[in-house]
Image (cartoon, helix red, strand yellow):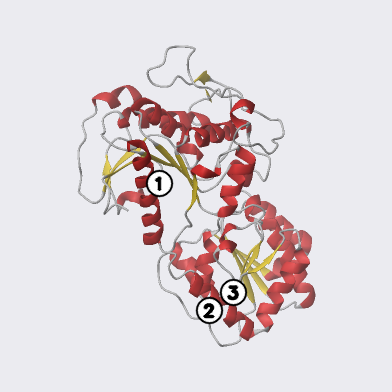
Amino acid sequence: MAKDVELTMIVPQAEEQVLEEQAEVLGLGSLDLSSIKQAPVERSFERFADTHRVPANLFPYSESLDLEGQEYQPEGEEEGEGVTAAAAAAPVAEVTPEEAPRQQPEIKYVAGPKGTLNFEVIQFARFAARLASHKEFDVVYAHDWMTFLAGIEIKTQRKVPLVLHVHSLSFDRQIGHPWGWIYELEVKALQAADLVIAVSERTAQMMIKRYGISPKKIRVVYNGFSGRFIPVSSAEPKKQVTFLGRLVAQKGTLQFLKVAKEVMKQDPEVKFVVAGHGPQLEEAKHQVQKLGIAESVTFTGFLDSDAAVDLLRTSGVFCLPAVSEPFGLAALEATQAGLPVVLSSQTGAGEVLPKASISDPNDVAGMAEHILELLRDNALRQEMVEANQEAIQELTWEATAAQVYEALTAVLKVKED
């Protein structure tokens, strides 16, 4: 997308190495809030974007709740007039776009002590808004809830359209029981946005049914992938089933182990690999002992992209029994590596993989049967992989960027009209 637009990126200080090779990084990480207004911009090198590193330690997919501390005052507002949010613990019913604005309470964002998650979100919003006040731009484009407050702030100050790209929602991460203040922030931001991009139709429907967002302002843009396809092997598959992803409840980590136990009842020779890291790691290790399958399950920990590809290439089947997965890029990576995939019906990637074996996430026996069938039937394996690879041929990051660019252009056209 950078070839078509002048792009400025404002990102947290954490994990800066992810962007170092692709974008210009300005040395703003050590500046305090009051000094940013006078901070000079020093370019280190020209690539495709100005990337501002803000001293806020935000990591994707994290959630925690700490509401002790000071209320957040948006830039330029007097004491007592700030946009804020308290936790809403009550169950959330389906809402319509018409009902949603009346149902949502006034949102009260409260900053916890330095180092807590909501402090970092508010810190990021403050820095981002001040940085944006020195920039000329046409649209604000924010990804996921940690940057939504910043997006709202900049939209309000600069009177420009706000486009949100939703990769995950509280309903996914907390499996139907979202944290109060994070859910409220998502609701407020989604309602304030001029356009919302969802990574799957599943995510779009969740925003409509659970957040009361009008379908008229939602666009589905699927994630892409890079690299080349590996043809499916005609040789007998290795009896190894792989799970690749963060070890969290929404991905179905423990469900995968139940499926493994069920598979081993019929074929004790099958081995299982759990690749990834996350808060459920120790619980998962305890679970394999409890299920009596510790000798057949390997935990690799975090794998970089090259190691992950190597693992997939030496596996027989990829399985993602997610409880609530907006997309599931690992399923595309497995398909790319020549693997058949077994997914839950709660996985967005199933929308673009027409031949994937799909079961309800609670149907352990059904998922196990799919795995055994794919390990036994080579013709079925080849048919699945070839059909799925054909289906995602055009699903590249270039195509994704082009669709995002089209969406941004459409928002600007509406503003001009």
Residue 74 in the image: above or below residue 268: above
Task: Report crowding for label 1: few under 14, some 14 to 19, many 20 or more residues within 10 A (C-alpha).
Answer: few
Numbered badge on residue 15:
1
- Which label was assigned to residue 340? 3
Q: Which tag is nearer the camera, tag 2 or tag 1? A: 2
Q: Position of residue 142 (x, y in %)?
A: 42, 41
Three-letter amino acid code of the residue under disc 2? Glu
Residue at mark 3 to residue at mark 1: CA–CA distance: 33 Å
Q: Position of residue 302 (x, y in %)?
A: 52, 58
Query: What amino acid does circle 1 point to?
Result: Glu
Question: Which element type, helix, strand or loop, lies under badge 1?
Answer: loop
Give how far across and how far down residue 136 sits, in percent.
26, 34
The disc label shown at residue 386, or none: 2
Q: Residue furthest bottom?
A: 235
- The residue positioned 48% from the left and 32% from the top of the image is 192
Cα gap from disc 2 to disc 1, whole angstroms = 37 Å
Q: Picture quarter containing residue 151? A: top left
Give the structural element (helix, strand or loop) at label 3.
loop
Q: Secondary structure at mark 2?
A: helix
